[in-house]
Amino acid sequence: MDSWPGRGSGRRWWPVAVLPVLLAAAVATGCAGDEPEGTGKRPGSAGTAQPQVPAGFTPAAAGPVRIVHPSDWKPAEPPEGWSFLADLTGGGEVEARIGVITDVPQIPNAKLVTESAITVVQLNLGEVRRGPNREIDVPGADEAFRVDYSYPNPQARAGAAAGAQLKAVDIGLIIGDRQSAVVRLTGLPSRLTPALVDRIVRGIAVKP
């Protein structure tokens, strides 16, 4: 399953290289929707207490972004444009992973960040099923949006018995002076249960 968006032998599946281009294009065409700049900003979140690391989880940092992941997910070499990557492997295959994309343009709208990031996934993988873009609170971030989606497993389409769909979650963050980042979770649905995903999302923070 190394062909998930982000890293692996199937480099075409990773949207890293074209993400900045599409983000810039999205800004130019005004695809942020009908919300004015700054809508949904939560300046008070900067003072929110940093989350505690739950038992069985390991903290990690990617620049100012702080995350937690299950302790059996092991750090791996991140691809270009990413500042952190950790994988859960089973039987020699990657079954789930978390990464932090920091090489994104400094756009002042977290919703636009997530919309643009998922557009790149759609461009590379085609049939993406997605939910709404939801604002969430991330301690230390000026703004954060979450979008859940799924897409066909590229290796399954090639005949591998690995499951037809992969689950994914993108968290777009605005940090300080319009710095942007995306926290991305991907994996088999059996590995990314709703409870685990929510626990990981609650552990995302920005260093004050």
Image: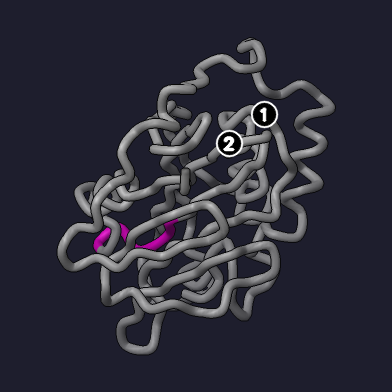
Q: Residue shown at 50%/72% (left/top)? A: 155
- Marks 1 and 2, how far apart at CA: 7 Å
Amino acid type at circle 2 is Ile
Residue pushed farthest left? 55
Q: Residue shown at 60%/35% (left/top)? A: 115
Give how far across and how far down residue 75 sits, in percent: 44, 77
Amino acid type at circle 1 is Pro
Image-quadrant location for residue 90? bottom left
The stretch of residues the image draws in magenta is 185-190
Q: Compared with residue 202, is residue 54 higher up or lower down, i.e. above or below?
A: below
- Residue at which label 2 appears: 174
First of labels 1, 2 by sequence position:
1
- Residue at which label 1 appears: 108
Q: Secondary structure at mark 2?
A: strand
Task: Say whether marks 1 and 2 touch (CB < 8 Å).
Answer: yes
The magenta stretch spans residue 54: no
Give how far across and how far down residue 160 sits, in percent: 44, 78
Give how far across and how far down residue 139 sits, in percent: 39, 38
Q: Nearer the viewer, residue 41 or 196?
A: 41
Q: Residue shown at 52%/30% (left/top)? A: 142
